[in-house]
Image (cartoon, rainbow, N blue to C red):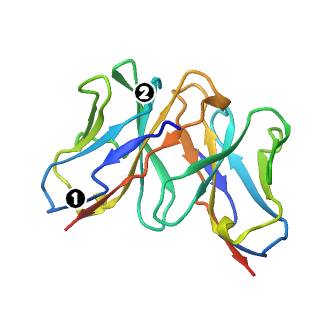
Amino acid sequence: GQNIDQPTEMTATEGAIVQINCTYQTSGFNGLFWYQQHAGEAPTFLSYNVLDGLEEKGRFSSFLSRSKGYSYLLLKELQMKDSASYLCAVRISGGYNKLIFGAGTRLAVHP
Amino acid sequence: EPEVTQTPSHQVTQMGQEVILRCVPISNHLYFYWYRQILGQKVEFLVSFYNNEISEKSEIFDDQFSVERPDGSNFTLKIRSTKLEDSAMYFCASSGPSGRGNEQFFGPGTRLTVL
């Protein structure tokens, strides 16, 4: 089976740093994606990891440990507009790139 | 920047009716997908499409569902006889053969309401 776990909700303060964790147990692994989704809107791509380590892109970084089945998304210098759901998704190997999504972490950024 | 487009943005239908959701993927992409998201729940994979045929489908994608690429630009999802539980946001996505891990670009979605 496919199992992707992430916290349901998190809160943080504007200007702070927040880390959103994701653990996965999937039958096959070919990359892990993080998407941002504002309410009522489509997921938008944030980051991608296929090898172990940290990928940094501006205020966002993502880390992957394949041996532990673990990833995190790090958001720095939080802004009010970062209030959204953050979706962890695993691309399953052996297929045609289908993504299996976690339930998402709803992040609320407060002043 | 190229984007995936979907029409209509909102579709209301009666139970048992057929609906067709339309998508125009990014023009040089080769892989196409439909996902759905029931309100308050996670995004779920429905089907992937490559080289003019279904490459993979989930258990949700039963005989009531079909996909088609009728011309070089459109990609459609048909639900033959809608049920109440088909009410959801339906997202089309596409990806190309190269780029950052073949990321999937999502369209804005069609909100389907079955009454």
Which of the chains bears the disc numbered 1? B
At a point 29% along the width and 61% down the height, the residue shown is B85
- SS class, disc 2: loop
Of mark 2 and mark 1, the one earlier in the sequence is: 2
Alpha-carbon distance for marks 2 and 1?
Answer: 32 Å
Q: Residues within 10 Å of mark 1 (few under 14, many from 20)?
A: some
How far across and how far down the image is residue A34, in percent?
Answer: 67, 48
In the rendered image, which residue does mark 2 sit on? B27
In the foreground, A69 or B110: B110
| SS type, badge 1 | loop
Query: In x, y percent, where is residue A70?
Result: 78, 48
Residue at 28% in and 27% down = B69
Q: Quadrant of residue A94?
A: top right
Q: Where does residue A56 sit, x and y in percent of width and height?
A: 83, 44
The outermost residue toward the front is B1
Snapshot quadrant of residue A26:
top right
User: Residue furthest toward the top?
Assistant: B51
In this picture, residue A26 sits left or right of residue B39: right
* Residue at position x 46%, y 64% in the image: A40
Mark 2 is on which residue type? Ser
Which label is found at residue B23? none
Task: Provide the residue designation for mark 1.
Answer: B83
Question: Viewed as shown, does residue B21 lie left or right of A56?
Answer: left
Are tags 2 and 1 found on a single chain? Answer: yes
Spot occupied by residue B79 in the image (x, y as percentages of width and height): 22, 46
Quadrant into which the C terminus of chain B falls = bottom left
Amino acid found under the numbered disc labelled 1:
Lys
Q: Chain of mark 2?
A: B
Disc 2: CA contacts within 10 A as few (<14), some (14-19) or many (>=20): some
